[in-house]
């Protein structure tokens, strides 16, 4: 029989080993932005790469893995964030749109709650866009709703705080660094979520970045003046085109009283007042102004990435910390003449995803498997060695990070957008996409005959300009994609 003294000695021997095992669990830093398009990340290439918009995010990609086929299941802010926390499609976590009628139940299962139960410290700083008291976080400080770029308010467990005279991206970064360097328990693994407001509309840059791109002509996309010739009602009736839907006052700070006395925007006011721009000329000026402010907002986010990476290295924990950068969905940078998101077309449907995992992910590697935002909750749990609930609907991408694509990895993706009537007047639609084809079904109110279809061959038409749903040459492929859509609806429990 083991004596009391031997038990004490055994515990004294085992305790350091247990602590060491706990310490070896990887830390996770998840840096997240709002409406950040892959087109404006240098590492993704494209027409904007030469502007060097994201040097720190590009370095992250050079040291990690870039995902070229990462997508969302519903391209709108609050539902996307609810999906990230729950690992479930919008209709399952019930936050299907941004309206107040659609409420997120914080009591439901969320990945950070499971991490807490498995020895992780958890922190959430920034934008979450899900009203109510946060759960599963040892520390949280979040923006109310959309939040403000300047003089932002934040909500905490103890109450509200206003950061007068400060810029929101800087506040989020500073609060994250403070927790990372001063407030976390040094001997426990952690999950820190740094979720930025930028570059969400209305694109208010930090004052220090207002001069960037001032004398630069931003390249236009080839389909900037798209006439939607082959598209259905939804593309023709949307309210997100730069020419007519982008507001001169709130979006571009070029008219009205809101920014009239702000010296940063004086030249815009003068240009609008003096020059009688109309039609295509005005649309092109709006595009240039919008793009420059958007890119300026991204500069603050990119600086934040650099500061956090620097802090991890200075603390000597960078080699045991996985850093992930992503966004809640994509965004239109003038493609099809648009801004905003919502549609299942590529620029909105697709989102950036970059992962650095020292000693595991090959630096500079690129993955082209189909991944979706329903996968991230499972991935975080897998990285932490925590159990993944069976009712989560995604798959951990840890095998992909190890360059080991499972034989049964998904071949197609399901998408569903619900918010109509609503902002930007994008019709409800669902669809299925694989690496070659995309099938979209628009349905419901204000859709002729209650239903319209679009079909694209992404290989021959990557810009999705030619809807070939009526093409007899693609009849077999369209039929197969409809069958796949039915199968995915059944798999994910879609009933509406």
Image: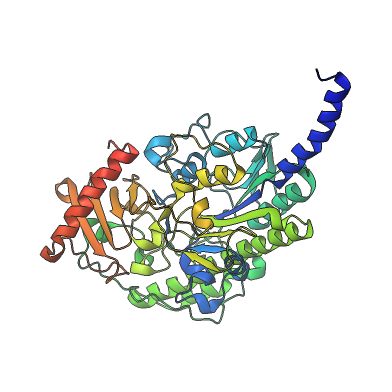
265 on left or right of 371: right
124 on left or right of 43: right
Q: Is residue 134 visible?
A: no
Q: Furthest-left residue in view?
A: 472
In the foreground, 140 or 291: 140
In the foreground, 332 or 167: 332
How far from the left and from the top, in percent, is residue 148? 59, 51
Q: Is residue 487 visible?
A: yes
**Number of numbered discs overlaid on the protein picture:** 0
Please determine whether, in this image, residue 31 is positioned above or below residue 53: above
Quadrant in which the N terminus appears: top right
272 on left or right of 481: right
Quadrant in which the C terminus appears: top left
How far from the left and from the top, in percent, is residue 52? 57, 75
- Measuring 71% from the left and 41% from the top, which residue is drawn there? 22
Q: Furthest-top residue in view?
A: 1
- Measuring 65% from the left and 47% from the top, which residue is drawn there? 192
Q: Quadrant of residue 345?
A: bottom left
Q: Quadrant of residue 207?
A: bottom right
Q: Quadrant of residue 455?
A: bottom left
How far from the left and from the top, in percent, is residue 64? 58, 63
Please determine whether, in this image, residue 444 is positioned above or below residue 200: above
How far from the left and from the top, in percent, is residue 454? 22, 58
Please determine whether, in this image, residue 279 is positioned above or below residue 474: below
In the foreground, 361 or 4: 4
469 on left or right of 221: left
């Amino acid at each position: 029989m083991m004596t009391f003294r031997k038990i004490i000695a055994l515990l004294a021997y085992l305790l350091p080993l247990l602590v060491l095992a706990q310490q070896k669990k990887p830390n996770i830093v998840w840096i997240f932005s709002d409406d950040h398009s892959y087109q404006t990340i240098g590492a993704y290439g494209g027409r904007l790469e030469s502007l060097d918009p994201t040097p720190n995010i590009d370095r992250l990609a050079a040291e990690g893995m870039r995902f070229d086929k990462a997508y969302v299941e519903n391209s709108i802010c609050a539902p996307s964030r609810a999906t990230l926390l729950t690992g479930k499609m919008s209709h399952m976590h019930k936050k299907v749109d941004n309206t107040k009628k659609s409420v997120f139940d914080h009591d439901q299962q969320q990945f950070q709650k499971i991490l807490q139960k498995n020895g992780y410290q958890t922190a959430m700083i920034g934008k979450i866009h899900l009203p109510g008291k946060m759960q599963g976080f040892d520390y949280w400080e979040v923006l109310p709703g959309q939040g403000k770029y300047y003089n932002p308010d934040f909500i905490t467990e103890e109450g509200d705080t206003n950061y007068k005279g400060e810029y929101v991206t800087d506040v989020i970064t500073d609060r994250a660094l403070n927790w990372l360097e001063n407030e976390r328990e040094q001997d426990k693994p952690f999950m820190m979520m740094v979720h930025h407001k930028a570059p969400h509309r209305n694109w208010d840059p930090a004052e220090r970045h207002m001069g960037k791109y001032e004398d630069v002509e931003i390249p236009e996309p080839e389909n900037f003046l798209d006439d939607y010739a082959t598209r259905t009602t939804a593309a023709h009736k949307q309210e997100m085109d730069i020419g007519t839907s982008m507001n001169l006052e709130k979006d571009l700070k070029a008219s009205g009283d809101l920014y009239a006395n702000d010296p940063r925007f004086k030249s815009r006011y003068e240009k609008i007042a003096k020059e009688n721009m109309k039609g295509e000329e005005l649309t092109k000026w709006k595009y240039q102004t919008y793009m420059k402010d958007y890119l300026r907002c991204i500069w603050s986010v990119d600086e934040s990435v650099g500061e956090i990476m620097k802090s991890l290295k200075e603390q000597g924990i960078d080699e045991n910390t996985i850093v992930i950068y992503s966004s809640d969905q994509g965004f239109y940078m003038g493609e099809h003449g648009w801004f905003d998101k919502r549609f299942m077309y590529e620029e909105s449907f697709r989102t950036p995803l970059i992962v650095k995992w020292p000693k595991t992910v090959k630096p500079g590697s690129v993955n082209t498997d189909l991944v979706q935002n329903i996968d991230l909750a499972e991935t975080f749990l897998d990285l932490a060695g925590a159990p993944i609930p069976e009712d989560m609907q995604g798959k951990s991408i840890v095998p992909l990070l190890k360059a080991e694509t499972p034989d049964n990895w998904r071949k197609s993706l399901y998408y569903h957008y619900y918010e109509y009537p609503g902002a930007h007047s994008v019709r409800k639609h669902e669809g299925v996409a694989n690496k070659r084809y995309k099938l979209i079904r628009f349905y419901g109110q204000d859709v002729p005959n209650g239903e319209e279809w679009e079909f694209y061959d992404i290989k021959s038409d990557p810009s999705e300009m030619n809807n070939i749903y009526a093409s007899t040459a693609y009849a077999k492929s369209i039929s197969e994609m409809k069958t796949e859509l039915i199968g995915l609806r059944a798999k994910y429990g879609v009933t509406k």
